[in-house]
Amino acid sequence: MIKNFSWAKLREPRVAMRAVIGVLLAANLAAAVAAFKPFGGSADDLRKQESELQDRLAAAQARLTISKKLVDKVQRAGHDGDAFLKRYMADRRVVSSTIDEELNRMAGAAGVQLGQAAYSFQAIEGSDTLQMLTINIGVGGSYVNLMKFVNLVDKSPKFLIIESLQTAAPQQNGQTLAVQFKLDTFVEGAEGAEL
């Protein structure tokens, strides 16, 4: 049939009418599909889609609430960390006087005598602003007074850590002990800052 088709036959009224009727029939079928089955789906399909979208919205809002709580916790942790550093860490520029003052206060309260203190700084891996300060100091006093001093160092607000104690022989009178303390604390400030 296609072989027999020629454009000349299209000019005949009967063939032209059949072509027009065919086009109109296709247009009517397209209109019927659009009228009876909308492209958005039926009412049930739209209700299901609405329900799914509301579930997704509720899940997204729950994730948003969790994210807001996490942001609040991170900000609070940052503020708490800064407050901790400010309260317990000495500034490198004034650390020797701050620690000396704290050690003298505790020695006076415990009734012990302090010897010469030696300070050494060590970098803390992973931190640009914190360093560990090691203090070697000799302390002399009675056993009871030394125990009180140890207790005060342990409860010091300057975050002093007793790394080691080394007891020397008792002094001549037998009542006084000499102990070499190695204390650690943390210092905030740049490595090149002056003492």
Image: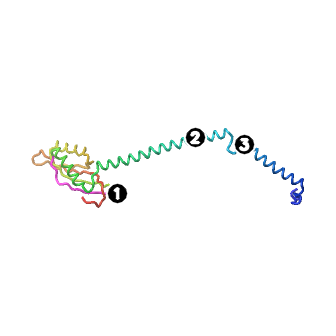
Report the number of discs.
3
Labels 2 & 3 near each other (Cβ < 8 A): no
Q: Amino acid at mark 3?
A: Lys
Question: Which of the marked residues, 2 or 3, is nearer the chain's N terminus?
Answer: 3
Label 2 to label 3, Cα distance in Å? 24 Å
Pointer 1: residues within 10 angstroms few (<14), some, or many (20+)?
Answer: few
How busy is the neighbourhood of tag 3: few (under 14 within 10 Å), some, or many (20 plus)?
A: few
Residue at 70%, 43% (x, y): give it.
38
Where's the N terminus, which quadrant?
Answer: bottom right
Q: Nearer the viewer, mark 2 or mark 1?
A: 2
Q: Amino acid at mark 1?
A: Asp
Q: Residue at x 72, y 42 (%)?
A: 37
Where does the magenta region start and end?
A: 112-123
**Circles 1 and 3: CB atoms closer than 8 Å:** no
Determine whether the residue tagged by mark 2 lies in a helix, strand or loop.
Answer: helix
The residue tagged 2 is: 54
- Find residue 182 and report its horizontal and vertical position in percent: 23, 51
Toward the front, the furthest residue is 13
Dot 2 amino acid type = Gln
Give the number of the disc on residue 168. Answer: none
Q: Which residue is mark 1?
A: 128
Question: Cα distance, mark 2 to mark 1?
Answer: 48 Å
Q: Secondary structure at mark 3?
A: loop
Q: Is residue 120 magenta?
A: yes
Image vertical order of residue 11 relative to residue 83, above or below: below
Q: Which mark is residue 37?
A: 3
Which one is in front in this view, the residue at disc 1 or the one at disc 3? 3
Q: Is residue 102 left or right of residue 51?
A: left
**Tag 1, which secondary structure?**
loop
Q: Is residue 162 magenta?
A: no
Q: Position of residue 123 (x, y in %)?
A: 31, 57
